[in-house]
Amino acid sequence: MTSATKRLATVPDADARRAARGFWRDALRRLRSRPLPMAAAVVLIILVVLAVAGPLLVPYSYDAQDLLNANQPPSAGNWFGTDDLGRDMWARAWSGARISLFIGVTAALLDLLIGIVYGGVAGYRGGRADELMMRFVDMLYGIPYLLLVILLTVVFQPGLFSIILAMIVTGWLGSARLVRGQILQLREMEYIVAARGIGVRFPRLFARHLLPNALGPLVVAVTFSVPHAIFTEATLSFLGLGVPAPLASLGTMVSDGLITMLSGEVWRLAIPAGLISLIMLAFNALGDGLRDALDPRTLG
Amino acid sequence: MLRKRRVLRAAVMGLVALIVATACSGTTGGPGATGTAKAELAAVQELTVATAADGYRNDDKRTTIGMYPLNANIFDTLVTLSPDYQVMPGLATKWEFRSPNTYRFTLRSGVKFHDGTPFTSKDVVWSIQRIAKQGGGTVGVSEQSAVAVDDLTVDITPKGQNLRALQQLVHPTWSIAKAGSDAAKPMGTGPFKFVEYVKDQRIVVEANDDYWGGKPTLRKITFRFIPDANTRVLALQAGEVQISDIPKESAKTITGDFTVSRSKVGAYEAIYVKIRPKEGYDLGQDKAVRQALAYAIDKKQVVESVWQGNAEVIQTMIPPAILGSEAGRITGTDRDVAKAKKILDDAGWKAASDGIREKNGRKLQLTMVVGFPNADTHKPMPEFAQAQLKEIGIDAKIVTTPDTASYEARLAKGDGDLWVEAGSQNDGNPCFLPDLLFSSPIPGGDEESNMYGNSFAPGESFDATIKRCREATSTADVQKAAADAMKLLVDEQFVVIPLAGTYRINGISKKVLDFVVHPAGVQQRWDSVKLAK
């Protein structure tokens, strides 16, 4: 071994010293280096913990009425005050946030799942099948989203199930398009052609080679579609098509609290509205950070 | 003919708010609302009023611009309704009943329409014929019903036996318009002349200085249609309008440069229980269930806590005042949890592990439909009732329909057990609402009446009471029949659970004087109103 080659081997350059790092670790490093997405992630974790545990911290149930203590401002006894039926707003706000988050995350994940299957098949098969499948998506895209969702919640009995269903019916279109685009781009890559050449079948090819390489943009898409779903739920609840009483969601609470714009019990409106804003802001900031982290090319 | 009632009623209730907006300074009215005749008057006597959504129609079925649901005082009616629900002279100064089915009206002389032409019996005949062509209205008139005896005498004979015609003619849909006039350009004899109507935006009227009842002080009134209640109140707070209704749950805490005043009871909040069969919605057929429901809800808490004192407990659906001394015969129900539970236990409804009762494997789950005239009117009462029903082991599912149309679409299908309604009494006939809502359905009969009858009609003995009411000749007999009908609905069959009599609550600018509220919003008068400096 010459001294030259020895030097090469023992004096690693900056990149090589970072040892073997995968795409995901790189992404995580890029994410960590940015304060806003990290703060958003921390806020989200706190919100989720409170949505799960928050109602347990107070001795009131979200639906326990106490008319003698109706419309009380936040105090030591009721941290978020009480509503017009004397229900504890802390318990309602967090069980409402739980329902809103549940709806948002479930709808977003199911959207993605359907989108992956549909878009994956369309993108990989290509040709006529792709043409037909995507024109169908375009057709559905033509129907105003909120109108369709409202129609569906009216047809089905209002409830968690029908809200999620209504959102999925239109929500998967976006992820289907995204997945198809990714697959179209990836399927001509040499490693895919190679895999096909050695006889890897479609399901395995899709799960092991195509999907992992398309995952980055999909993760970003989900992060953005969660707040979208939460916002849609809030809109539906606001229109009176949300979760059935006495269940609370953030949207129904805003709807109930609207009247207080006139009478001054601002906490009844400000707390659920603030929580919706916070959740959406956090998801959007995190999504933004994830996009930069997972797809560095988009960094200007 | 009932078709019209329905629209009347629907709009009435729907527009309760609107008229609330206009109607309410009331007996409990603040200083701004009552007479301050000595106050110095403003030089510009122009009033702007916020009212609910535009409910005017001008189509084959109805012609109501300026009349109903917002009564802009462009027209007069033959007879009018006092705040105590008594029939008073209007364009007719006298009337007499002529057996078997006719009322003869003597008309006021010297009355002129806004264009200066004199008012005579031919205008009455024309106006009645117009309603006959549109279906006959509440009274049930045909084109032959109105007959001019001479220039100032007119006979009105409804198609069917209906002695309540006199009390029904007070409703502003029976306004007298100039013969041959165009409904889109209302031409009446009232204290205000039509200026302009812009659909969904405003109707504007100006003073009729030749009004037979005296020259109005106000020069101009602009009624602005603002569908959203919160927006109406914001307009009042901003001073854009001088009068607006105020939602009852915020009446106590709301502030601004205005007086909050309330009318006497003219409207009500009640739950109707579906008594007639429909698959999936048939538990109300069990009388024990209906009775237990009646004892489950704390009416006192509804009015005192849920609505913060802006209502009062009544045990009838219609305002007790209209029943006179007969009102006391209806005992009604108050919350008695032990009794309600016992009734259900005795009927075989046993509580399961989740607290909800069961019988023969069927859960005691009821669907409560909320939305007449709109969902917001009732808030937050339904959730309160839901919690109280849960206490006696009834699981109530709340279904909210946003407006009257969606509510009625659901009622027509009969998909629900409990139906929450806010209604109001707008004419002088105590049997109006019982007749309309609870008569047995007649094949080919009025659509709305049948829609209600198909769900709530208790049957023959009730129908017989209503027939007595239609044919009664004295006020005492009418009140007695109406009270019998109410007693059957409330005390015996438990089809109706009256919760509260509600007020019209208005915010009135402190500059507005002499605004005397009428408990029936459509009867509101504007000619006494003045503006202070």
Image (tube, coloured by chain):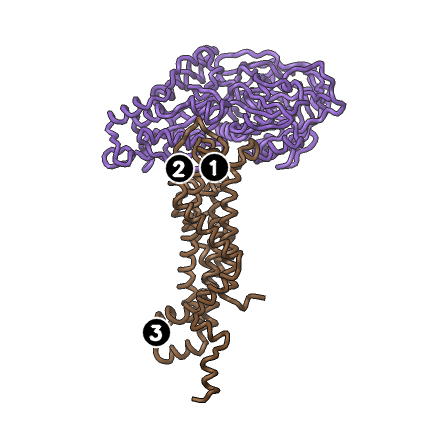
Chain colours: A brown, B purple
Q: Are marks 2 and 3 in contact (CB under 8 Å)?
A: no
Q: Foreground residue, B333 or A90?
A: A90
Residue extending farthest to the bottom is A2
Examine the rendered structure and indicate whether residue A279 appears above or below residue A205: above
Q: Residues within 10 Å of mark 3 (few under 14, many from 20)?
A: few
Callout 3 secondary element: loop
Residue, disc 2: A58
Checking the image for residue A80, the label placed there is 1
Check chain identity for marks 2 and 3: say if they share one: yes
Drawn side of residue A277 relative to residue B150, left or right:
left
Examine the rendered structure and indicate whether residue A133 appears above or below residue B386: below
- Give the tally of numbered discs: 3
Task: Report whether residue B59 is seen.
Answer: no
Examine the rendered structure and indicate whether residue A169 appears above or below residue B211: below
Residue, disc 3: A201
Drawn side of residue A28 relative to residue B361, left or right:
right
Q: Foreground residue, B67 or A180?
A: A180
Report the Cα–Cα distance between label 2 and label 3: 55 Å
Check chain identity for marks 2 and 1: say if they share one: yes
